[in-house]
Amino acid sequence: MPNSIAYVKNYTSILDRVYQRASVSGCLASGRRMVQAGRNAKEIMIPKIEMTGLGDHTRNVGYKTGAITYEFETKTFNYDRGIKLLADVMDVEEAGVLECFVEAGSELQRVQVAPEADAFTFAQIAGHTGVTTASKSYANADAEDILEDLRTVTSAMDEHQVTTGGRYLFITPTLKGVLDDFSYANPNRSNRVLERFSRIVEVPQVRFYTAIDLLSGGDDGFGYQKRAAEYELTSDTEVDSGKTYYARSGSGTAASPYVYTEVASPVKASLGTYYEITTAPGLDVNFMVIEKSAVIKFDKHVASRVFSPDELENLDSYMMKYRKYGIVELFDNKLDGVYVSASTS
């Protein structure tokens, strides 16, 4: 009879991973003193101090009297996210992949935690009250257009006495590539505005929005997504020339979702069918200029642990828990050190 030899299966230790970058916003993390201040409370009280300038000193009267204003601004922790992952002990042991939770923990950080932390950081900064946000499409722009806009931003910050030592340029890889190609092709053309930044960081567009929604893990799914616009029927009885109205088409099904189109010339007779935006959508960010000391960013609590089946009372499973609780905010007196350029659509 012929030989029958079963081939041995050999498993590699090389994980088939999706492409993903590590965190790009970690460079904005706050220093040790801020972390210590946020240890024991849900809110952080940040002192602000202002005082009058100098006046004339006269030999008969002496000093002019000025004033000191010392007050506190309150910042509240605004990020509390987590996940619990389970795997039945028999599924794990029969598959022979006891180390899967080690790999899963690493992948969770790289594929889920880091991208969401970046997206949340940039959206919080872009959406902060008082932050300058300019809308401009760079779809057909060349490097000189981008360099000109960066010069305008840096000049404004210089005039507002924003330090260059911690001034970061966060920019999409696409726009950074345009600048790089220009520099190589035109070595004699000036791009010295880039020297006005202490660091240039590329941010993938999927993490770079003016607003995001953190999904609950329920019917809406997990993770985050760029915020979509929300609409409702207008209650106006007269056309308001200062408003933008939208007409809705589609049936609202997966095959035919609603589409909202701006009404170019609204008329009173059709007001009952017009919609208004109640929640503005998130826009793609082109670039951000951020002076690091303007940002409050740290994690007050990070918990990550793997539990064996012996530790779980009601389940015969391995379990991994991860939680992250922190804050991303801005100092109210340092908003001149933040600028956002977003797309127009």
Image (spheres, rainbow, N blue to C red):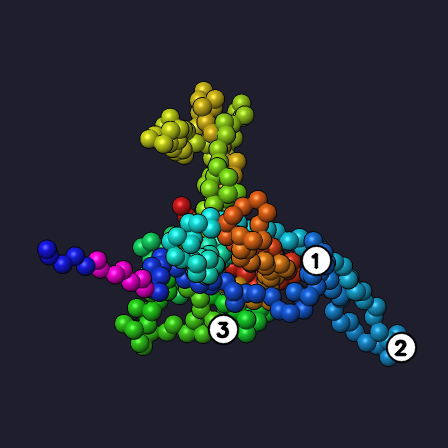
The residue sitting at 55% across, 71% down in the picture is: 166
Q: Amino acid at mark 3?
A: Ser
Q: Is residue 314 visible?
A: yes
Q: Is residue 7 magenta?
A: yes
First in sequence, mark 3 or 1: give its number.
1
Q: Nearer the viewer, residue 99 or 71?
A: 99
The residue sitting at 57% across, 44% down in the picture is: 314
Q: Indicate the position of residue 148 as horizontal and vertical percent values.
A: 41, 64
The residue sitting at 70% across, 54% down in the picture is: 43
The boundaries of the magenta stretch are 6-12
First in sequence, mark 2 or 3: give its number.
2
Q: Indicate the position of residue 162 as horizontal and vertical percent values.
A: 58, 68
- Give the labeled residue for mark 3: 198
Q: Is residue 186 magenta?
A: no
- Give the labeled residue for mark 2: 60
* Above or below 216: residue 43: below
Q: Amino acid at mark 2?
A: Asn
Mark linked to residue 18: none
Q: Indicate the position of residue 177 as horizontal and vertical percent values.
A: 33, 65
